[in-house]
DNA sequence: CATTCGTGAAGACGAAT
DNA sequence: ATTCGATTTCACGAATG
């Protein structure tokens, strides 16, 4: 399996590594390089020098969870060889009480075998769960970093994932799907929510699966997460657009007025927040274009138009009332 | 010229059946 | 699982400044 036979694996210095990978030649001994799939390294076959570490395997992984899915395999998770599969490290012990030649075992041997089976099974399932958890937590951390999610929310995400794993919710679903759902739930519960689209943009799983898994996890763990308050998006939009504190404050007032009239149910919270920022910009004479607000909020100009008209209307009638 | 506004067709989503 | 209603988006052209 391993291309190199040399036990010691020194690591090459970064210089000239890129070029040696391209030319497929070892910088030390001119031997040729080979990829070690199991370790994710690129190493020389002659001297064992590792020229590239932690190479990400982008190849497909085909897994099935039960016979029903065997014929409609889908891509799930990271490559099997690297993080998931146990790579032959664990052992299965047969259930038949016979030795290698097929003879029945004595009762003393049977008891001994039974104990071995029990412990072996415990070890196997325990380490499987730990691999699962390690993988998932690394994935959560990667996505959280990309989104700049605060540490407290990452903790929440990992707690949610642990609970999901304990309750067996990950079976039949991809680890990454559940990990993403846990992160999404965590940021929704925190102080700086991210939209489903934002979370999707850093996940390896498509939007639909995230949404489905999110709902599932929410229901199974009895988590109650209401609709996001649009006002929570205001500070982020404000700083991205460099608008004044006054305008920012004004935007919040507009949202308050709208909420009092229940003008916000069923609408996209981000869209509402974006419209509030735009409208507040008009009111305080520091101009932001609809295009700019839409850009940072990932909302179309059309939606901003619709919302900000409603917002101003709600504000008017509450002033006169 | 840039920005804003309105429209109709089309897609996405949640709720209800 | 399908259907329905509301929302959002896209593409376009017109109006406004």
Image: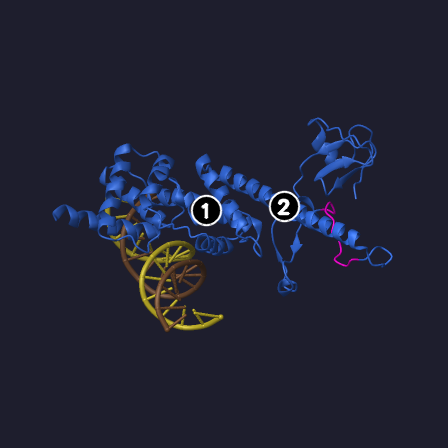
Chain colours: A blue, B brown, C yellow
Q: Residue at x 25, y 51 (%)?
A: A309
Q: Residue furthest right?
A: A101
Q: Chain of mark 1?
A: A
Tell me what residue is drawn at x 42 percent, y 52 percent: A222
Provide the residue designation for mark 2.
Answer: A126
Q: Secondary structure at mark 2?
A: helix
Q: Which residues are magenta?
A: A87-97
Give me the disc on residue A184: 1
On the rendered structure, is A200 left or right of A131? left
Q: Chain of mark 2?
A: A
- For disc 2, the neighbor class at 10 Å (few under 14, some 14 to 19, many from 20) is few
Q: Secondary structure at mark 1?
A: helix
Question: Which residue appears at 81% of the width and 56% of the height?
Answer: A105
The residue closer to the viewer here, A292 or A185, is A185
Residue A286 in view here? no
User: Percent from the top left, x then y, of residue A212?
Assistant: 48, 56
Q: Residue furthest left?
A: A320
Which SS type dominates the magenta stretch?
loop
* C-alpha span from label 1 to label 2: 27 Å
Q: Nearer the viewer, residue A282 or A178?
A: A178
Q: Nearer the viewer, mark 1 or mark 2?
A: 2
Q: Residues within 10 Å of mark 1 (few under 14, many from 20)?
A: many
Residue A164 disc label: none
Which is nearer the N-term, disc 1 or disc 2?
2
Q: Identify the image quadrant of the N terminus of chain A.
A: top right
Residues marked 1 and 2, same chain: yes
């Amino acid at each position: 399996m391993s291309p190199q036979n040399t036990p010691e694996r020194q690591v090459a210095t970064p210089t000239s590594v890129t070029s040696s990978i391209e030319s497929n030649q070892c910088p030390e001994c001119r031997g040729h390089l080979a990829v070690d799939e199991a370790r994710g390294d690129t190493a020389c076959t002659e001297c064992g020098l590792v020229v590239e570490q932690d190479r990400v395997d982008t190849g497909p992984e085909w897994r099935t969870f039960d016979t029903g899915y065997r014929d409609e395999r889908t891509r799930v998770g990271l490559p099997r060889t690297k993080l998931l599969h146990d790579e032959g490290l664990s052992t299965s012990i047969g259930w038949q009480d016979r030795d290698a030649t097929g003879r029945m075992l004595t009762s003393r041997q049977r008891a001994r075998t039974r104990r071995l089976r029990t412990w072996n099974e415990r070890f196997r399932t325990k380490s499987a769960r730990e691999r699962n958890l390690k993988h998932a937590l690394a994935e959560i951390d990667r996505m959280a970093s990309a989104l700049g999610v605060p540490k407290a929310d990452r903790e929440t995400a990992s707690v949610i994932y642990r609970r999901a794993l304990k309750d067996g919710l990950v079976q039949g679903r991809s680890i990454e799907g559940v990990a993403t759902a846990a992160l999404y739930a965590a940021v929704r519960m925190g102080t700086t929510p991210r939209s489903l689209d934002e979370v999707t943009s850093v996940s390896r799983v498509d939007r639909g699966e995230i949404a489905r898994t999110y709902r599932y996890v929410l229901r199974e763990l009895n988590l109650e997460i209401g609709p996001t308050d649009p006002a929570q998006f205001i500070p982020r939009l404000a700083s991205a657009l460099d608008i004044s504190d006054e305008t920012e404050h004004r935007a919040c007032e507009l949202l308050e007025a709208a909420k009092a009239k229940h003008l916000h149910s069923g609408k996209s919270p981000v869209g509402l927040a974006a419209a509030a920022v735009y409208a507040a910009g008009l009111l305080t004479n520091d101009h932001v274009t609809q295009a700019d607000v839409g850009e940072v909020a990932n909302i179309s100009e059309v939606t901003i138009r619709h919302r900000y008209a409603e917002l101003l209307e709600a504000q008017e009638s509450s002033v006169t009332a």
